[in-house]
Amino acid sequence: MTLLKNGDGIRWPGGKRIAAMVTFDFDAELLRYSAGGREATAFPDYSRGQYGPREGLARCLKVLDEQNIRSTFFIPGYIALRYPSEVTSIIEAGHEIGYHGYMHDERLDITRDEELENMKKSRSILEKMYGRRITGHRVPFNSFHTFSYELMQEEGFLYSSAMQDCDYAYLKNTSNPEHPVVELPTDHCLDDFTYFYFSYNFPGKQSNRDVDDVFSIWKDAFDELADEGDKIFVLKLHPQLIGRASRVRMLSHFITYMKEHGAWIATCEDVASYVKEHSSIRY
Ligand SMILES: [Zn+2]
């Protein structure tokens, strides 16, 4: 059995070996607050979320600037209202911004109408700041709904980055086959939350891994996928976690490594547009 790729004949621009996306979820205090609510969220967890806007984001933007790459930031609408100057600094640095819920709502029983309202409210806030249309969608907390792809297609989203079903991008069939949504899967092993979220209050969330271990895990995944060819690599980061002083340098070293080993590093929107034009894999 041969390994599936991004479709017959698809090749990344410039003969690059792999498409890499360095993405951020700019959740700030909503990272845990939206799951537990005010009563259940211990103050240290809430406060740690604020490390993103207060300090981590600036470090991440500095690394992206030094590396001269463009990134994608998924931002809840509420956070854009709460931290407008920080979101403006992301936009002014030339990065893409995408939809990530309004209050980072993780409820699985949310109705289609409620979600549509979240989407419209957030897009209007984000697009006013961005000055152009939002085309990217990442559900908060992986809380995907049966109606999510349909809603994305109806609302004109180009892509989603939520699934974990493969290492290649594909076109997701919706009721309108002329306008499929491109899916850019990622995985928990490429998520800084897996390694760096420490909490006394959430059972099982007591990670604080050595940065060299994490570099090594990401490098092994990257090398294998680059060797296989035509795969994607979606790093999923949070300014409040990777933006800590002890970690951000590792991110910079890792971006250098990817550049030196054949990565096409681009925004999710750029990769999704390319995939939509070239891929033949539909699910
Ligand atoms: Zn999030």
Image (cartoon, rainbow, N blue to C red):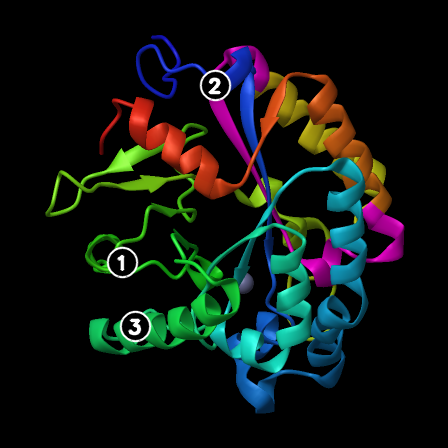
- For the residues labelled 1 and 3, say whether their Cβ atoms are less than 8 Å apart: yes
Is residue 2 in view from this perspective? yes
Closer-to-camera residue (178/114) = 178
User: How far, Cα to Cα, is label 1 from label 2?
Assistant: 28 Å
Q: What residue is pinned by disc 3? A: 115
In this picture, which residue range is highlighted in magenta?
226-248
Of the numbered discs 3 and 2, the one sitting upstream in the chain is: 2
Position of residue 112 in the picture relative to residue 166 (left or right): left
- For residue 54, which quarter of the picture? bottom right
Of the numbered discs 1 and 2, the one sitting upstream in the chain is: 2
Q: Amino acid at mark 1?
A: Ser
Residue 174 % position (x, y): 16, 45
Q: Secondary structure at mark 2?
A: loop
Residue shown at 36% from the left, 45% from the top? 159
Q: Secondary structure at mark 3?
A: helix
Labelled disc at residue 12: 2
